[in-house]
Amino acid sequence: MLAENSRIPTVSRVCTDTLVELVYDREKRTTALAVSRFGGLWNIEQEVKIETGEVLVPYAAANNLIANECVLLPSAPVAYGLKDELVADVQAFLHRYVDLSPIFEQIAAYYILLTWVHDAFGELPYLRLRGEYGTGKTRGLLTIGSLCYRGFFASGASTVSPIFHTLDAFGGTLILDEADLPYSDARAELVKILNNGTVKGMPVLRTIVNRHKEFNPYAFKVFGPKIIATREPFQDQALESRFLTEETGTRSLRPDIPIHLPKAMKEEALMLRNRLLHFRFCEFFAVKTDPAALMAGVQPRLNQTALSLLSLIDNSALRAEIQQHLIQGNVQTLEARQNLPEARVLAAALAAFADNTGANVPVRAIADRFNREHAGEYGAPMSYRWIGEVLRSRLHLVTRKSNGVYAIPVSEKGKLEGLAQRYGLTLTKLP
């Protein structure tokens, strides 16, 4: 049982039909809790008692993340008007300060809206700006992130530990610049955050030893929207599939984009965050997944990734336009995946199985097919051993030795066909 007057420093809480959100007045340097109990009506309070017996209180304004604006908060709810008007004003703000492609500008506007109600969904996509230095990635992060729900700004120069702790304590939206981390251990930790952060209820366990030197693993909550900038794609294909990506630097910069962000931008962003907070208060309990937004004929992962975003788009024509953009991007992703070494080995294995009359297909037959197609690209024929290693370690297929020859048994045909679908290989069903 919790003590009757347990005082809990609080950033956000959803309690049955009540929403509680931390707000910060940077002029007065004070924090408080904005509380909505009646579908959009709200009060500013210093203490909120809830049914568990806890008394929720705001985080202190002196908290470094708040005082230094590493985490951006609203100051108070402001009536947002109509949803279409709010989205239009968000998009106009983005258009003033960052040069995005027209379709991605619309995606980003709705993604900002999604960040403010993201916890009403079970799965989320991420936004990514990808390109070389000097192509506007950081400007994009600063502009988009300034409107997001509790935008938390970090960079590749940050150690991963404070990112874990801040996400666990503050939640909100992680805005990560230069996510191409230079050290493999830091990259691995970041990949854990990104892989687990798209699905609600998937914390990252990290080892912690308490003051009594007892082993006591801690589950860090990492679920939430994330916007990152990178130069290169991630090697992890599962992670790559979670991003809605804008390629930066592919066209000349619009001449009306300011070289330096004006001071007025901060005030504009604050006013929009205040309206977006009111949108959360009014719409959170009404938001739900819309099955009509599912895309036909695409891989399940694309629907899982995009459904929450598409569910917020009421305009059917715009929704269809964004769906088509996502489908085209998915086709490009599949085409890139088909050029991976494991996809090429898989294609050779499928072709060898299609021509095979026996129970098993020798690895050498697969290697011979692979080398006929691709030896020139690799500078020399690849060895049977290398092909076997790709089959086992990357495609996770079973190989067995029979009469001194390694082969894939016929029992693996079903797995091969499943892999073909995953890699977008359009081959006929195996005999």
Image (spheres, grey):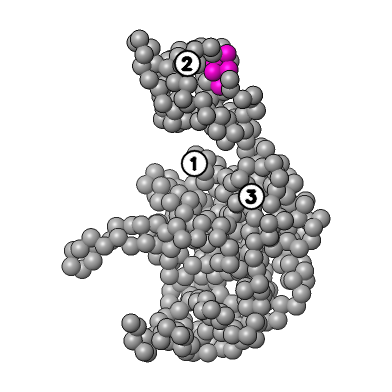
Instruction: Specify the principal SS of the magenta part.
Output: helix
Up/down of 90 relative to 304, above or below: below
Residue 215: % across, % down: 23, 60
> Tag 1: Cα neighbours inside 10 Å, few (<14), some, or many (≥20)?
few
C-alpha distance separating marks 1 and 3: 19 Å
Residue 48: % across, % down: 48, 88
| Element assignment for label 3 | helix
Q: Name the residue under label 3.
A: 303
Amino acid residing under circle 3: Asn
Amino acid residing under circle 2: Ala
Q: Is residue 254 left or right of residue 410?
A: right
Q: Mark 1 points at which residue?
A: 236
Q: Is residue 407 left or right of residue 84?
A: left
Q: Give me the residue at 54% from left, 18% from top.
A: 353
Q: Residue furthest left?
A: 212
Magenta region, residue range: 350-355
Residue 359 is marked as 2
| Element assignment for label 1 | loop
C-alpha distance separating marks 1 and 2: 34 Å
Image quarter hosting the C terminus: top right
